[in-house]
Amino acid sequence: MLTRPLLYILFLFFCQSIVAQTEKKDSLRLIEQPIPKEKTQFAELADDIKKVFHLSSKGLHKVGHQLNDVDTTFISPNKYNFAFMLEQSTWFEHYRLGGNNQDGNQSISFAPNANAKIGIYFGWRWIFLGVSFDIKDLLGKAKSEHQKNRKEIVFNLYSSKFGVDLYSRKTGSDFKITSYSNFNLDKDYTDTKFEGFESKIKGINAYWIFNHRRFSYPAAFSQSTNQRRSCGSLMAGFSYSQHRISFNHTLLPQAMQNQLRPSLQFHKLKYTDYNISIGYGYNWVFAKNCLLNISLLPAIGFKKARINDQSEENKDWKKWIKDMNVDLITRAGITWNNSKYYIGASLVLHTYDYRKQNFSMTNSFGSLRIYMGLNFLKKKEYR
């Protein structure tokens, strides 16, 4: 028989074993199951991300609505999400160099042959993206090495309140002499080929439309809205551009070289242009679905330039020059648009003026577009 003390000892041992097994099971259960606190933190993080995304999408939608808020008695808003367009574009440019001394002003002008392209574009809301091809390439006509060096990149954004133009252009060197003055020559050198001129331009132009609820720039230049009643608007803008001009005067006809002013015997001209513009644009609705736009933005430009002259007698030209000049941005467009289909043409021309006491240069470049296309896939609110 077991004594009473031994029974007490066995009873205590039994109780401790039960407690130990219970604690082991509980510890295993804690290992197998996720910690509730950590699960709550991840869930809260996911909820926060959803809230931020929801608020961001609502904010973007609100900003988009504000940027394109219009008076529907003057402007019909764009009812479609996407657009398709075919376009034929022609780039052109012109440069005039001038030199002054006691004998008066001497000038000489250059321009390349216009460069024509065909493009295919797809648009979403404000933005058009696409690709263009040189017509000579499509026709199988060979181009010279000077023409192959041409490069053009353009990005345009037109909304009701503001617009932005981004551009980068590099010319070839297939220029010709278009005009000149104050040369005493026995022969006419107009239209003579000149391969000693090259230009690179890149910049950004941004502008604000004050009467944006009644005046629509997109109606004239991106076909995303329709102007129903004639209206105009005051506009203001800012522009920044970089210009690099290379000029090898030794490739001019010998008779012109002999009479060329020292101030025109430079090799490179580099200048940066900052300007502030203010102007006016007008949309004339001259028939149903027909619109004519003309806008002019004169600008006061601040130019920071450097002329690198290779002539020993003109070393004093190698210095930084800060000057104020007048530039001009011109736009014109005509279009027929019934909201679904459209056809039209537009012209955009940039003119920059650089002047010093005995030297001046006016360079202009622009594009002429002829296009046709259609809008498709209506927005949800117009279905």
Image (spheres, rainbow, N blue to C red):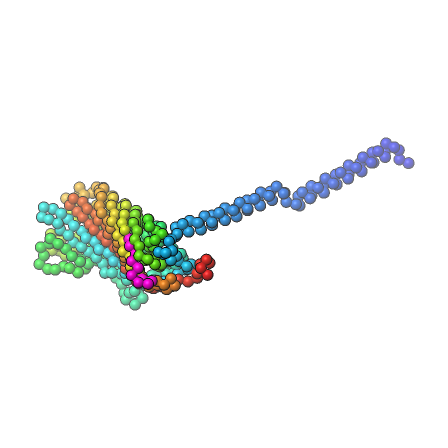
| Left or right: residue 70 compared with residue 324 | right
* Percent of width and height locating residue 324: 22, 43
In the displayed image of the protein, which residue is found farthest to the top?
5
Q: Provide the major secondary structure of the magenta segment.
A: strand
Residue visible at 17% across and 47% down in the picture: 359
In the displayed image of the protein, which residue is found farthest to the front?
73
User: Residue 9 lies in what quarter of the image?
Assistant: top right
Q: Is residue 325 visible?
A: yes
**Within the magenta stretch, is there residue 283?**
yes
Residue visible at 25% across and 49% down in the picture: 298
Quarter occupied by the N terminus: top right
Along the viewing direction, whichever of 243 and 362 lies nearer the viewer: 362
Along the viewing direction, whichever of 322 and 232 lies nearer the viewer: 232
Along the viewing direction, whichever of 96 and 301 lies nearer the viewer: 301
In the displayed image of the protein, which residue is found farthest to the right?
1
Residue visible at 10% across and 48% down in the picture: 104
| Left or right: residue 361 compared with residue 259 | right
Count every numbered label the image shows and give the total.
0
* Percent of width and height locating residue 176: 19, 58
The image shows residue 25, relative to residue 160, as above or below, that is above
| Left or right: residue 362 compared with residue 61 | left
Along the viewing direction, whichever of 224 and 143 lies nearer the viewer: 224
User: Residue 2 lies in what quarter of the image?
Assistant: top right
* Percent of width and height locating residue 345: 29, 61
Residue visible at 14% across and 55% down in the picture: 180
Q: Which residues are magenta?
A: 281-290
**Within the magenta stretch, is there residue 248?**
no
* Percent of width and height locating residue 259: 11, 52
Q: Is residue 145 visible?
A: no
